[in-house]
């Protein structure tokens, strides 16, 4: 696994303009929240898919930087827990709106394709990068 600096600098290269960053600051949390809500509906015995995704993504983030991953995992768990109380139609609306914001950010402001089109791991890096930038973790300032 590559170091967190690699992922953050690679992701940051696709997110340089203020307009793109602002659309991502709103769009990415909407996508994460609604994804948890939609995946919560998929049950297998006593486990739902959202909880499994939360656990696996938390392990991924901990391997990158556990000190940043622990508070991030608390936030994403709150997303998971609170998203369970919202109906699927609203989750779909939030999910679509979040992706529309992403598209606006990349095509109107950045004039560059989304990062995950060249590296699929950026689907996971995006939320972590936003969180670290918001909380001013030093390594996310790229």
Image (tube, grey):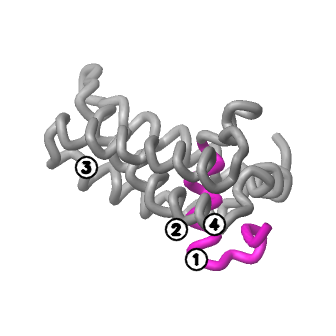
Residue bearing mark 4? 68
Mark 4 vs mark 3: in front: 3
Mark 4 crowd level (few <14, some 14–19, many ≥20, 10 Å Cα): some
Q: What element carries label 3?
A: helix
Q: Nearer the viewer, residue 45 or 138?
A: 138
Tag 4 and tag 2, C-beta contact below 8 Å: yes
- Tell me residue 138's x, y (percent): 75, 76
Mark earlier in primary sequence (1, 3): 3
How far apart are the two marked residues, 4 and 2, measured between alpha carbons?
6 Å
In this view of the protein, which residue sits in the foreground, 42 or 21? 21
The residue at which mark 3 appears reads as 83
Of label 1 and label 4, which has the lower sequence position?
Answer: 4
Q: Quadrant of residue 34?
A: top left
Q: Residue 142: x, y in percent?
A: 79, 67
* Quadrant into which the N terminus falls: top right
Residue depicted at 60% across the width and 40% down the height: 123
Mark 1 — residue?
135
Magenta residues (range): 124-142
Which is the main secondary structure of the residues drawn in magenta?
helix
- Disc 1 to disc 2: CB gap under 8 Å: yes
* Quarter assignment of residue 70: bottom right
Say whether residue 69 is magenta: no
Q: Which residue is painted at 81% across and 50% down in the image?
A: 10
């Amino acid at each position: 696994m590559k170091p967190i600096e690699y992922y953050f600098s690679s992701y940051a290269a696709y997110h340089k303009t203020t307009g793109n960053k602002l659309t991502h600051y709103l769009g990415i949390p909407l996508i994460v929240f609604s994804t948890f809500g939609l995946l919560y509906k998929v049950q297998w015995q006593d486990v739902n898919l959202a909880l499994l995704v939360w656990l696996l993504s938390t392990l991924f983030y901990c391997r990158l930087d556990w000190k940043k991953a622990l508070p991030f995992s608390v936030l994403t768990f709150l997303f998971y827990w609170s998203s369970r109380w919202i109906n699927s139609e609203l989750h779909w609306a939030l999910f679509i709106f979040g992706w529309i914001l992403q598209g606006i950010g990349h095509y109107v402001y950045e004039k560059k394709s989304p990062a995950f089109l060249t590296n699929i791991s950026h689907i996971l890096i995006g939320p972590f990068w936003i969180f670290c930038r918001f909380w001013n973790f030093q390594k996310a300032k790229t």
